[in-house]
Structures are given as C-alpha cells and as structure tokens.
Image (tube, rainbow, N blue to C red):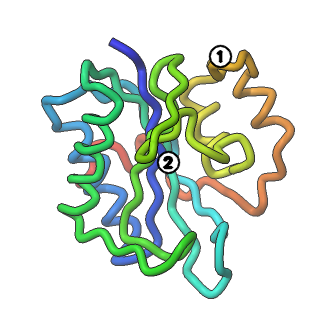
Amino acid sequence: MPICYIGLGTNLGDPLKQALLARHTLSESPLWTLSAVSSLYRSRPMGPQDQPDYLNAVVALETSLSPEALLDALQAIEQQQGRQRLRRWGERTLDLDILLYGDQVLSSERLQVPHTGMTQREFVLLPLVEIAPELHLPDGRAVKDLAAAIDNNGLHIAKRPMEWVGTH
C-alpha cells in the first residue's frame, strides 16, 4: 500500500478542536492506517492577512484507496466537520489536502499530486520533514533539503505530537 501524506489546516470554528476531531476521525477510519502524525504548527495566513492564524499538521496514511477515492473520503471528513471556505486562500474550518500519494505524479481537474505549491509552503514542508525526514519527492528532491532552505515565516510548534495525539 502506498504511503500518502495529507496536509491538515484550520483557522475557524475553534481550530484546536477542529484539528483534534480531524486527527481522531483519520485515526479511526477503516479505509486506511494512520502511520504518523506531525506536531501541530501555528502559521500565519498564506492568503489575505485579515484572518486568524492557522493550525497545520501533516499525517501519513497507508491506504489501498485510489487517489480519487482518497480525495472523496477526505472531502467527506471536511464536510462532516462543517467545512466553510469563504474565499480563495481564506479562512476555513478544515482543509485536508493530499500532498503525496506514494511516488505517483497525477494531474487531473480534481487532483494534483504532488500538491501544487507544497515546496513553497513552510507549513507543509516543516511538518512533513518532521515525520518523514528521509522522504524524496517523485522528482528526486529531498524534503529535508527543501525544508532547510525555506523561510519559516513565523511558523512555530503549537503542540507536540503527544500533546495533541490521543486526546479528543
């Protein structure tokens, strides 16, 4: 089964509660095995600056679902948690993005893997390298090299894995 890396982001509706609920739902699903969870990071908004800071994390899943079926399952979790997305790159209750699906490269109307822009986002690279320090992207670039070269843009750990994993 391929290892898939999922980015989690939230800044509305009690972000810590949203992150905890999403992590719990991901860990309980029979559709995959949750194999790693990063720290929970606080980040400045990437888009409009008139919105709250985000909480971000990356999780690793092992699944036999196709990429599109995984996307559907993740979007269902977002909807269960009352997903609100008010504007492009704006505030949201929960965002679950497929960052990587094994070593596959996919490009469709619904899904881009590796996730578009992930190599320019500190809130993706730093949690990703935390749980997969030896990971290489499908194009051969080492995630640890990309993470070492990126400005952290004020990103900092809000909760270590054991402070937010196993609580609900």
The earlier-in-sequence mark between 1 and 2 is: 2
Q: Which residue carries the number 1 mark? A: 134
Q: Position of residue 146 (x, y in %)?
A: 78, 33
- Which amino acid does the dot numbered 1 rest on? Glu
Q: For the point 35% across and 28% down, which residue is it?
A: 61
Residue at 63% across, 71% down: 45
Q: Secondary structure at mark 1?
A: loop
Residue at the limit of the structure toward the left, as seen here: 30
Q: Return the x and y of residue 51 as percentages of the image width and height.
A: 57, 83
The disc at residue 85 is none
- The residues tagged by marks 1 and 2 sit, at their Cα atoms, a distance apart of 18 Å
69 or 97, which is in the foreground?
69
**Camera-nearest residue between 14 and 74:** 74
Closer to the camera, 79 or 152?
79
In the displayed structure, 109 sits above or below 135; it is: below
Q: Is residue 115 left or right of residue 149?
A: left
Q: In which quadrant of the rendered image does the N terminus lie? A: top left
Q: Amino acid at mark 2?
A: Ala
Residue that label 2 marks? 57
What is the tally of numbered marks visible in this picture?
Answer: 2
Q: Position of residue 94 (x, y in %)?
A: 37, 63
Residue 11 pos. (x, y %): 47, 72
Asked if residue 141 lies left or right of residue 130, the reply is right
